[in-house]
């Protein structure tokens, strides 16, 4: 393994060890920028929905 | 909710000179992090300040976190007298950044940017290299968290063809 490959593996390996899901990054990189934004907007919408539900009291979370 | 396509639409329509930075730039570069606002670095020449004001005024911008009755006039003079503005608008939270920490003003940030096509618009976006540079220097806990991911993304982009 040359130095370049070693460095590449270090950065990705470090991320993996810190709990970052490399498959998510890989899939994101395969998407076009607009698709990345659209994906992000779907998440924002989901989070917004959760916030609204919590505010309205319609989100019931049970902790064990 | 942040309406990115609408914001980009008006910025392009008014020919505003801006660069997408911060969390949205990270997402555009492949990050899996979430952000709730749009950060842009803007050119501070008078013509651009006027364009920026024309573009965003219809969305009733006011200072985020400030009482609604606090007088705030969103005009070119206000922008000229300040540098960074954290705004709430009808289309989401927008941060206007005059200087990016560790990189500099619009012209400096441009050197760390690349053009990405978003919703058909060709937009300048801070590169992974630029994001890593500024976040390394900021070194806040939230920046440290994302740095490892950005470094991995950079290596993956250099190594594989996407």
Image (cartoon, rainbow, N blue to C red):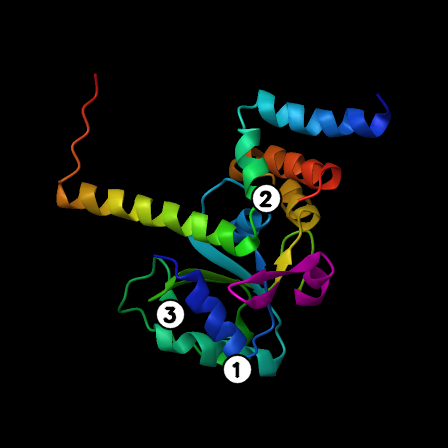
Give the mark nearest the N terminus, 1 or 3.
1
| Mark closer to the observer (3, 2) | 2
Residue placed farthest to the top in the image? A64
Which span is picked out in magenta?
B106-123
**Residue B104 visible from this viewpoint:** no
| Chain to which the residue tagged by mark 2 belongs | A
**SS at badge 1:** helix
Spatial separation of the CA atoms under disc 1 and disc 3: 15 Å
Tell me what residue is drawn at x 86 percent, y 24 percent. A2
Q: Along the line of sight, which residue is nearer the eye, B112 or A41?
A: A41
| Chain to which the residue tagged by mark 1 belongs | B
Q: Along the line of sight, which residue is nearer the eye, B73 or B15?
A: B15
> Which residue position is annotated with label 1?
B50
Q: Along the line of sight, which residue is nearer the eye, B5 or B132?
A: B5
Tell me what residue is drawn at x 29 percent, y 48 percent. A48
> Which residue position is annotated with label 2?
A30
Quick one: label 2, few (<14), some, or many (20+) residues within 10 Å? some
| Chain to which the residue tagged by mark 3 belongs | B
Find residue B61 and report its horizontal and vertical position in percent: 38, 70
**Direction from residue B150 to residue B6 in the image, left or right:** left
Quick one: label 3, few (<14), some, or many (20+) residues within 10 Å? many
Measured along the vertical axis of the image, is residue B23 above or below residue B93?
above
Q: Which mark is residue B61?
A: 3
Q: Quadrant of the N terminus of chain B?
A: bottom left
Find residue B136 and report its horizontal and vertical position in percent: 65, 40
Tags 1 and 3 touching, CB below 8 Å: no
Measured along the vertical axis of the image, is residue B116 above or below residue B54?
above
């Amino acid at each position: 393994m040359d130095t370049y490959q070693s460095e590449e593996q270090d950065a990705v390996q470090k991320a993996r060890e810190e709990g970052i899901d490399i498959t998510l990054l890989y899939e994101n990189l395969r998407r076009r920028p607009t698709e990345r934004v659209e994906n992000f907007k779907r998440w924002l919408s989901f989070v917004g929905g959760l916030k609204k539900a919590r505010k309205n009291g319609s989100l019931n979370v049970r902790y064990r | 909710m942040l309406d990115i396509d609408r914001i980009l639409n008006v910025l392009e329509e008014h020919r505003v000179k801006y660069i997408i930075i911060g969390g949205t730039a990270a997402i555009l570069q492949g990050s899996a992090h979430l952000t709730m606002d749009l950060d842009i670095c803007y050119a501070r020449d008078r013509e651009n300040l006027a364009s920026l004001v024309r573009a965003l005024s219809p969305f009733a911008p006011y200072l985020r976190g400030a009482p609604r009755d606090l007088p705030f006039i969103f005009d070119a003079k206000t922008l000229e007298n300040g540098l960074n503005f954290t705004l709430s608008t009808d289309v989401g939270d927008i941060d206007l950044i005059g200087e990016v920490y560790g990189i500099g003003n619009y012209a400096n940030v441009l050197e760390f940017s690349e053009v990405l096509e978003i919703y058909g618009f060709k937009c300048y976006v801070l590169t992974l290299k630029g994001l890593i540079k500024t976040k390394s220097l900021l070194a806040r806990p939230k920046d440290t968290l994302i740095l490892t991911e950005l470094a991995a993304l950079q290596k993956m982009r250099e190594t594989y063809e996407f």
